Amino acid sequence: MYLNRLRANSEGLIRKEQNISGLYSAYEQLMEQKLFQYYYQPIVDVRTNSICAYEALMRTAPPIKLNPMEILTIAREAGQLYELNKTVIFGIMDRYVSENDAFRGRKVFINTIPGYLLDDADLSALIERFQDHLDCFVFELLEDSPTSDEELARLKQLCKSDGQAQIAIDDYGTGHSNIINLLRYAPQIIKIDRGLIIGIESDHNRRLFVQNTIDFAHQNGIKALAEGVETLEELNTVIECGIDLIQGYYTGRPSEQPLADISDEVRNRMI
C-alpha cells in the first residue's frame, strides 16, 4: 500500500527507471546511518565583492543515490519530515563546528521544512549544543510556508538579540501574501526568487518588482539577496538595483568543501 501511494503521489518527482522498493530501502539506510553529505554554495557581499556566507544543500553519500526531491517525497509519505528536518539541521551545524576553519567564520544558511520546525525539546538541545555558534547560522523560511505562530516563536528563540541566529525569507516573490508574511516573520534577509531574476536585464516588470523589494527591505533594515544569478547581465542589473547579496552559478557553484573566494575575473566584473 505504501509503495502504491508513493508511485501515485510522486509522478515526475522520482526517477521512473528507479525501482520504488529500492528507493525506499536506500532511504531507510540513509536515515539509519545518516549518510548525508552537505554541499555549500557561496553567497557574495556586493560591498566587499567577496564571500560572506554559504547556503548548505543536502546531498547523499555513497552508496545512496537519492536526490533531495526523492528524499523529501519519501519522507513525506513515511511521515518522517520532522525527523529528516532535525537530522539535516543538526548535521549541518555539527559539521560547521567540527570543521570550523574551513568556513573562515562565515555564516551558513540552513533550509527548514515548512511546518516541521524543531519542537521545544529539540530546540533546547540545539541551543545547548551550539550556543557558542548560533550567530553563524541563518534559518530560511519559505515566504508562503505554513509556519504557525508557535513554531515561529520557537525559531525566534534563536534570534533573541544581536549576535544570535538570523532568519531569511526564501523564494521571496513566489507567494500570495508577500508583505503579510514578511512583516510576520521579521527576517534579517530576503532572498529574491530566481524566477524574478532570470532575464531581469530586459524585463521592465521584473526589474521594477525587484527594485521595489530592495527599497522596501532597506527601509526596514533588511538585506536583500538575489538568488540564482547566472549571467553577467543579471549580475549587473541586480547590482544597479542596489542588491546586498548575490547567490548563483555566476559567482560560485555548490561544492563539498566551502569555496575560499570567488574568481578574480568575477570580482573584477563586480567592481
Image: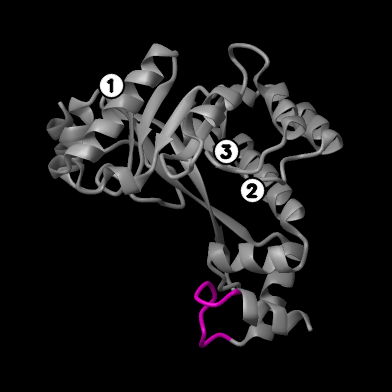
| Local SS, label 2 | loop
Mark 1 crowd level (few <14, some 14–19, many ≥20, 10 Å Cα):
few
* Nearest to N terminus: mark 1 or mark 3: 1
Identify the amino acid type marked 1.
Answer: Thr
In the rendered view, would you say 103 is above or below 217? below
Q: Amino acid at mark 3?
A: Leu
In the displayed structure image, the side of residue 18 where residue 91 appears, left or right: right
- Residue 245, visible in the rendered structure: yes
Give the residue at mark 3.
141
Say which label, 1 or 2, has the lower sequence index: 1
Which residue bears the numbered disc 1? 48
Judging from the image, the colouring scheme is one colour
Q: Which residues are magenta?
A: 10-18
Can I make out residue 263 in this image?
no
Q: Residue at x 29, y 33 (%)?
A: 209
The quadrant in which residue 259 appears is top left
Find residue 85 and name its label.
none
* Image location of residue 59, percent across then percent down: 54, 59
Q: Is residue 7 left or right of residue 105?
A: right
Q: Which mark is residue 113?
A: 2
Image vertical order of residue 36 relative to residue 270, above or below? below
Query: 119 or 86, which lies in front?
Result: 119
Q: CA distance from mark 1 to mark 3?
A: 26 Å
In the rendered image, which quarter is residue 218 located in?
top left
Q: Local crowd at mark 3 within 10 Å, few (<14), some, or many (≥20)?
A: many
Q: Position of residue 39 (x, y in %)?
A: 48, 51
